[in-house]
Image: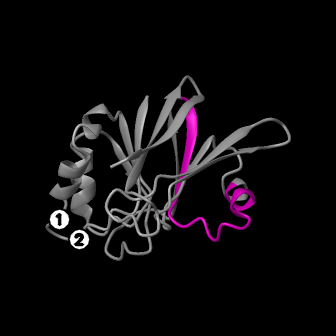
Amino acid sequence: MNVLVLADTHLGPGRAEQIVTLLGERLDRADVILHAGDIVDASVLGELAAFAPTHAVLGNNDRYLSLPLRRVETLAGCRVAMVHDSGQSAGRGRRLRSWFPDADVVVFGHSHLPWHERDVRADGHVQHHLNPGSPTQRRRAPRCTVAWLTLDGGTVVDVRHEAV
C-alpha cells in the first residue's frame, strides 16, 4: 500500500485546487492519503479524497474544521497514528510512544520540517515517527516536501521524503 503523507498545506478558501496542481501524479499513485493538520479549508480534503481515501487530524490553524485531535487507522495491517503537534523536539520520541504505545507509525506536522526516526521499544517493537514537512511552505526546511509510507502485511516496508 502506497500512503501519501502531507501536513501543513495552509490553503484557504478558493485555493484547494492548488494542491492537485502541486502534487500532480503523486495523487494517482496514492492508495491512501494522510494529512497531519493545518489544512485550513475543508475543500482541500475534498480535493484529496477525489483521488484516494483521506484521513486527517486537526491542526492549530484549522479553526472551522471538525476533525479529531488524534486518530489511529489500520492500513495494510499497520497501526498508523496521527497528531498535528508533537511538542518540542526534546523528548519527542518518548512522548509519541506514550501517546500511541502500539502504533507502528506516528505521523505529525506543525514544524514544516521533514523528519523520520525509528523508536525501538525494549520488546523490539519498532515505531516510526514521521513529519512529512510541507508541500506548500518550506519555512526553515531546505525545500517543500511530502512523505511516502509503503506498508505491506503489517510491515512498514519503506519511509521516504520527496521534494515537491
Q: Kindly give the residue lying farthest to the front in the view shown.
A: 142
Residue 84 locus on image (x, y percent): 50, 64
Please tell me whether residue 2 belongs to the stretch shown in magenta: no
Q: What residue type is labelled 1?
A: Arg
Task: Say which residue appears at 23% left-offset and 54% top-offset.
Answer: 19
- Residue 120, relative to residue 96: is it above or below? above
Q: Kindly give the residue lying farthest to the right in the view shown.
A: 122
The magenta segment: 77-96
User: In the rendered view, does 58 fall on the left or right side of 136?
Assistant: right
Q: Which residue is denoted by mark 2 in the rendering?
A: 12
Q: Which amino acid does label 2 sit on?
A: Gly
- Residue 33, relative to residue 110: is it above or below? above
User: In the rendered view, does 81 fall on the left or right side of 68?
Assistant: right
What element does badge 1 sit on? loop
Tags 2 and 1 in contact by the CB under 8 Å rule? yes
User: In the rendered view, does 94 fall on the left or right side of 16?
Assistant: right
Number of callouts? 2
User: In the rendered view, does 57 fall on the left or right side of 78?
Assistant: left
